[in-house]
Structures are given as structure tokens and as C-alpha cells.
Amino acid sequence: MKKRGPRTAVQIPSGKHPKSLSPTTLNKQPHTTYSADPMKMTPSWRIALAQIVDPWGWHGLDADGLMSIRVKLSEYEAKTWNEILVKQCHFNHRIECHKLCREAQNRLAELGLDDIEQLISLRLGSCERVWGILNYNVLDLLWWDPDHLVYPVFKQHT
């Protein structure tokens, strides 16, 4: 093993000065905060799983329909998942997959997603729903359900 000699101070050429002579502080604070709880985070969307075949495919939408969905999803982006799924739980829900209609359960199996326990339903209109799989704070968009058929609800006393 080779011995090293004593360290020497770095020589600063004459006329040159370091850019900062003030000492650095040790009590730095982050500019942004990160929450490990996805319910405190705002939603993001992923479209890789978005179905473009019947039933409940996105292919049947025209430009106006897509624009309407885009506007409504962007409104959700201003909220946290807690606000969406807890405070607005009468509109937006976690639905266990075994409660979905048989056709939806079969479609999940065809897609290899039959191990998913629950889907998220976001209300965009009186009957219109967007369905997806929540992964942390990202909703993998799956289905466009304009007629509320994936999880039909029958109102009592009507």
C-alpha cells in the first residue's frame, strides 16, 4: 500500500476569490412536502389500461365528450383522494369487484385483472362514470360507463 503525504490547503490564485464566503446553514427546510399517505395526495391519471373496445370503451366518445371528461377530471385534480372518496362518498366510491355486474367481472378476468379486489367509480354526471384501478395516488383509467351499467343501482320506491 502506498503512503500518502500530508494534505495541503488549496491555493487560490491571486486576484481570485471564492464565490461564497458565508458558511452554509445546517437547518435547511424542503420547499415542498411529501406525504406518504395517498389519501392526502391529489389524483393523477394513467391511460395504459383504458379500454377501447365494447363494452364501456372510450372509442365511442366524440371530441366534445372527451373534452367534457377532461374538464371534469381536471376538477378532481384540485382535490385530494380523501376529498374525492370520503367527503364525496355519495358520488365516488370504492366498489368491490365481486359486486360488479357479471359482464364487468368477466371482462376483468379476460384482461388478467381478476386479482384486483376493488375498482374506483368517479361520477362525472347523473349516470356517467369513469372506472379505474387506484395504485397509490394514480388512477389507472379502465372504463367509460355512460349509462351506469358496470355497477347498476336500482333506486328504492321508484
Image (spheres, rainbow, N blue to C red):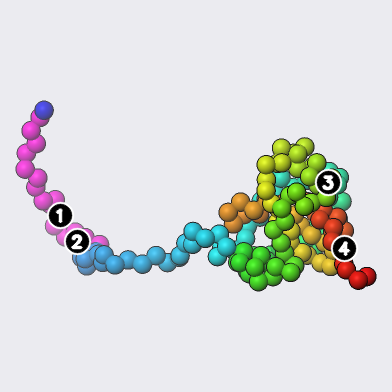
Is 149 situated above or below 23?
above
Of badges 1 and 4, nearer the viewer stands 4
Rendered image: mark on residue 107: none
Q: Residue 47 in the image: x percent, y percent?
A: 70, 49
Rendered image: mark on residue 102: 3
The residue under label 4 is which amino acid type?
A: Phe
Q: Quadrant of residue 1?
A: top left
Q: How far apart are the two marked residues, 1 and 4, measured between alpha carbons? A: 81 Å
The residue under label 2 is which amino acid type?
A: His
Quadrant in which the C terminus appears: bottom right
Secondary structure beneath disc 4?
Answer: loop
Cβ atoms under marks 2 and 1 closer than 8 Å:
yes
Secondary structure beneath disc 2?
Answer: loop
Q: Which SS does the magenta portion mostly show?
A: loop
The answer to whether residue 8 is magenta is yes
Residue under pointer 4: 154
Q: Which of the two labelled residues, at mark 2 and mark 4, occupies the earlier sequence position? A: 2
Q: Which of the two labelled residues, at mark 4 and mark 3, occupies the earlier sequence position? A: 3
Q: Is residue 138 left or right of residue 20?
A: right
- Residue beneath the point at 69% across and 51% down: 118
Residue under pointer 2: 17
- Which one is nearer the viewer's eye here, 158 or 27? 158
Secondary structure beneath disc 1?
Answer: loop
Q: How far apart are the two marked residues, 4 and 3, measured between alpha carbons? A: 16 Å
Residue under pointer 1: 12
Of badges 2 and 3, nearer the viewer stands 3
Q: Which residue is most to the right?
A: 158
